[in-house]
Image (cartoon, grey):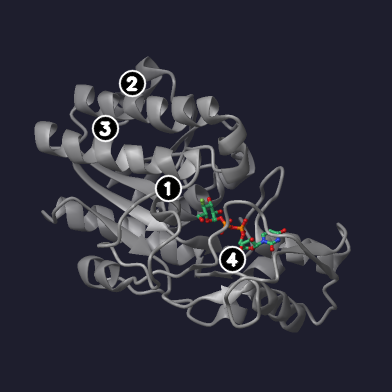
Amino acid sequence: MRVLVVGGAGYIGSHACLALAEAGHEPIVYDNLEEGHDWAVQWGPLIKGDLADGETLRSAISDRQIDAVIHFAAYAYVGESVTNPRKYFANNVGNTLNLLNAMLDTGARDIIFSSSCATFGVPDRVPIDESQPQAPINPYGETKLMVEKILRWYGEAYDLNWMALRYFNAAGADPEGRIGESHDPETHLIPLIIDAALGKRGPVKIFGTDYPTPDGTNIRDYIHVLDLADAHIKGLEKLKAGASSQALNLGIGRGYSVREVIESVARVSGREVPFEEGPRRPGDPPELVADPSRAISTLDWEPRYTDFDEIVRTAWNWHSR
Ligand code: UFG
């Protein structure tokens, strides 16, 4: 397949390009490089374009004879989405409509969309399966849920085939060290801990030690970015084989607390990790863990990185270079 990877210069998108190329597909990256990096585009051409630009999107799809689209491009800072929702709705929703409309105009009919566990808000119970109610608690999660809803209606009306993959916490890097996680500013836990261990920044702050969890810190389901990437490819292959459009939760089904993540980085790196205990970060649910069973059965997919230290090791190798 020739796959237009929108946002393919970003963290998860670039790993998807690597996985697509390794599976014998042809990734063509569409990215405005606002958050992405040109050095991360290594497995196919880069079209430097913006999602706001419908004309460039249409010609990218028709000129390159695109078979399918994977859509990663979005703003993804939860805190910023609360203070500047306009930016998030305009890009994550409005510009996604440009992409979907460009697909309709050019005859492209298969899309995998990056959704998020943030669409669930504070879950009633964990692990979270697809039957749980979606009730986002921030504009970022709301934008992802809105696009899921748009996909459903577009699917019914226009025969658009789609899958919305709801990631839990993407983690790790290409084990060969060609690409990895690089955000500016960095807000994600694992890179911040690694930087603290490397002395590149001060102690990592633990956001809250009074959560109703065994060690008081909150719990997340960290899934290796290449496992996420594989799920996208399986999703596209399934859609092409006639699978029905649907949303799936992608995690490994196990959660780790902030303290456990710090301990893992200390083990893997052999260094001390300086940390400080601080107050809760507003809007953080205590525990987010996926029930990935539907994704496993629907996609014939399984996370390969099930050892948490191994996930952290791939991140450590990338950052310490
Ligand atoms: N954390 C800290 N200190 C930090 C940074 C994070 O204690 O300096 C904690 C957070 O409170 C959270 C965990 O580490 O419990 C993970 O935090 P991240 O910021 O790495 O990730 P989030 O779980 O907040 O966010 C991720 C994705 C978002 C998505 C969200 C859904 O990055 O895009 O999951 O909840 F919206």
Amino acid carrying label 1: it is Pro
Mark 3 and mark 1 residues within 8 Å of each other at the beta carbon: no
As rendered, which of 240 and 267 lies closer to the eye? 267
Residue at 51% from the left image edge and 76% from the top image edge: 255
Kindly identify which numbered label has been placed on residue 185.
Answer: none
Amino acid carrying label 4: it is Gly
Q: Is mark 1 within 8 Å of ligand 1?
A: no
As rendered, which of 231 and 188 lies closer to the eye? 188
Whichever of labels 4 and 1 marks the residue nearer the N terminus, that label is 1
Dividing the image into 4 quarters, which one contains the C terminus?
A: bottom right
Q: Residue furthest top?
A: 55
**Residue 219 % position (x, y):** 56, 71
- Which residue is labeled 4 in the image? 172
Whichever of labels 3 and 2 marks the residue nearer the N terminus, that label is 2
- Which residue is labeled 2 in the image? 59
Left/right placement of residue 261 relative to residue 166 reads right
Q: Is mark 3 within 8 Å of ligand 1?
A: no
Left/right placement of residue 32 relative to residue 54 reads right
Decide: few, some or many residues near mark 2? Use Cα within 10 Å; few <14, some 14-19, many ≥20. Answer: few
- Which residue is labeled 3 in the image? 65
As rendered, which of 188 and 64 lies closer to the eye? 188
**For ligand 1, which image quadrant applies?**
bottom right
Q: Identify the secondary structure beneath mark 4.
A: loop
Left/right placement of residue 52 relative to residue 63 reads right
Amino acid carrying label 2: it is Ser
Whichever of labels 2 and 1 marks the residue nearer the N terminus, that label is 2
**Residue 234 % position (x, y):** 28, 61
Q: Please name which of the two marks, 3 or 2, marks the residue nearer to the observer.
A: 2
Q: Quadrant of residue 315?
A: bottom right
